[in-house]
Image (spheres, coloured by chain):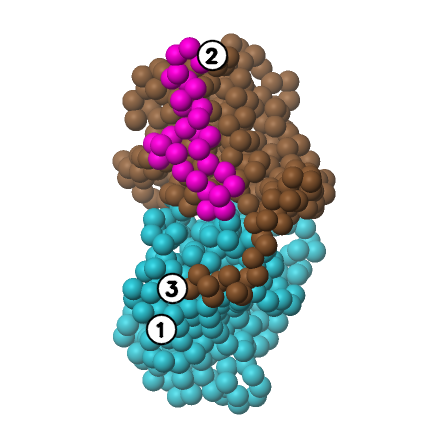
Amino acid sequence: MPGSGGGLNGPMRLARALSCEAICRIIGRLSEKLRVAGMADVRHRAAIELAAMEGQADVNGVFDIIGPIMVGPSSSHTAGAVRLGLAGRAIVGGQPSRADLTLHGSFAQTYRGHGTDVALIAGILGMRPDDERIPGSFRVACEQGMEFSFAGADLGDVHPNSVLMDLTGPNGLRTTVGGSSVGGGNILITRIDRFDVDFAGTSHALIASYRDQPGVIAKITSLLATEDVNIATMRVSREGRRARALAIIELDQPVSREARALITRISGIETVIALPPVVSA
Amino acid sequence: MYTSIVELTDAATSRSLTIGAAVREQEALDSGESQDALNRKMQERLAVMRDAVGRGLAGVRSRSGLTGGDARRMAEARRTAGAPMLIGGEPLGSAIAYALAVAEVNAGMGRIVAAPTAGSCGILPGVLLSVGEIRGIGDSELVDALFAAGGVGAVIARSSTLAGAAGGCQAECGAAAAMAAAAAVQIAGGTPEQCTNAVALAFKGLLGLVCDPVAGLVEVPCIKRNATSVAVALAAADMALAGIRSVIPADEVIQAMGAIGRELPVSLRETAIGGLAATPTGKRIATEINACDDQAECHAQKG
């Protein structure tokens, strides 16, 4: 499973393969994240992030090579698109009643031949990349009463294989999810509503939106610690001081329903979403 | 996981294992899964490959309408008495037909096994299933051979790349042919050392191959490059079985592939800008396929 490997001997091996410049960039990016999150132990966290990155850049096993089993024709334009849809569905907490999708770059230019459009809808409907119903996903959407539309647009300085999904969730609330298919069926979710985010969907994740105030992150992480859930990476962003903020925490283990309920009760927390991995071999 | 072909070959040779068995053992150690569980997982992939061959031979069309039906054409030519005889004989004829079949199923949005990628998914099943049939090889040995191919592919991924966007088609079809050549030598009873030479010989035959898909689709020339790559894989396997050695060792060939990929211009790395994509016919096809006004067309498709 991509991204699940690593371990703390990982950084040593990776250091040989990466240039100093690349490592500095990673640590720089990480320091920024940690500055925002108010954490101190940069070097320890850098080791964890490097290990996680090695998992992404790396093949973790023979079934990454002989596999995945998928519906064609393209790992990036089809399988990756299904996973982007799956991620969008998970973020809004179930099947949307409506999905308005904006395709960018190569996604906009070659979506028909690659079936990127039906693949995205298939993922939003909860199908996996090897589901043979993918080519007929539009019909399934109609049967299940999910409305959808597509448009092409320039989304600016983003990856060529990008989509912006405006999803009306089962709770009736609209959420905008932006993401890119970055190759080999791997994806990156880059935006949730107005927040820039950065996660690959390879591990369990917790997305918490809250009102910015001291102590919220500390309470979440200590709750996770008592549940014996290990944090792999973490990113926090906010609209401004004391304004709406978003924490994306990638985890080595899933969060139990009870732990999630406890986190929801932390003062200042608005919503908590527990996301399963959408990318696996 | 092994980090070089030489390490993989030494591990197999020193313990009198096939390459595939050595790869499976290591995978069991890395993943914590039992060898039986790994075999079942690989058997499932073999079954998907077989299904894809069957569907492709029956005849499929791609979503764009640009390709399809050539696997069937090849299969019929093999069967038709009195028609111009195919020159290559067997297993080449069936290997070509099967590779076309799987690649066409991929273009038609059918289920395939990326091996190592979707664009190069026909080569390994093409070689393995055709050689397996002609030699009467059982599934357990075919599964072993898939582990061998996977081990070779993992080394390529670690030391260079398997992505057309990074290394051109040599990184996809070239890698697939190298993997398939090792698998073929293994089921033909060759030594791990011979498998290693097959990897190097097949890869050398496809070094420098560019990725220049017409209209950016995984169809032209991808499908037929799957078919021509099986010929390279089979030629390399036969040379290795005859005891022919590659002067440049497999690990160095893999390094060279990565270096060549980095030197390829962006126009020839899956961008649909150069090569066959830039020919008059390629450009005309691209215009026709992408002619629709996105918004109008997609709203029309809705429901």
SS at badge 1: loop
The question of residue B62 being in magenta is answered with yes
Kindly tell me whether residue B79 is visible in this rendering: yes
Chain under callout 3: B
Q: Position of residue A202 (x, y in %)?
A: 44, 57
Colour that chain A carries in the picture: cyan
In this rendering, the answer to whether B21 lies above or below A253 is above
Q: Give the alpha-carbon distance from disc 1 to disc 2, as whole Å.
A: 58 Å
Q: Which residue is depicted at the point 33% across and 52% down?
A: A133
Question: Which residue is labeled 1 in the image?
Answer: A97
**Residue A118 drawn in magenta:** no
| Residue bearing mark 3 | B303
Q: Secondary structure at mark 3?
A: loop
Residue for point 31% across, 17% down:
B136
Q: Chain of mark 1?
A: A
Q: Identity of the amino acid at label 2?
A: Met
Q: Is B146 placed above or below B261 here? A: above
| Snapshot quadrant of residue A201 | bottom left
Answer with left or right where residue A93 lies relative to residue A59: left
- Could you say where residue A132 lies in the image, as x and y percent from the top left? 34, 48
Q: Residue at x 38, y 43 (%)?
A: B111
> Which amino acid lies under the numbered mark 3 shown in the image of this protein?
Gly
| Residue segment shown in magenta | B54-83
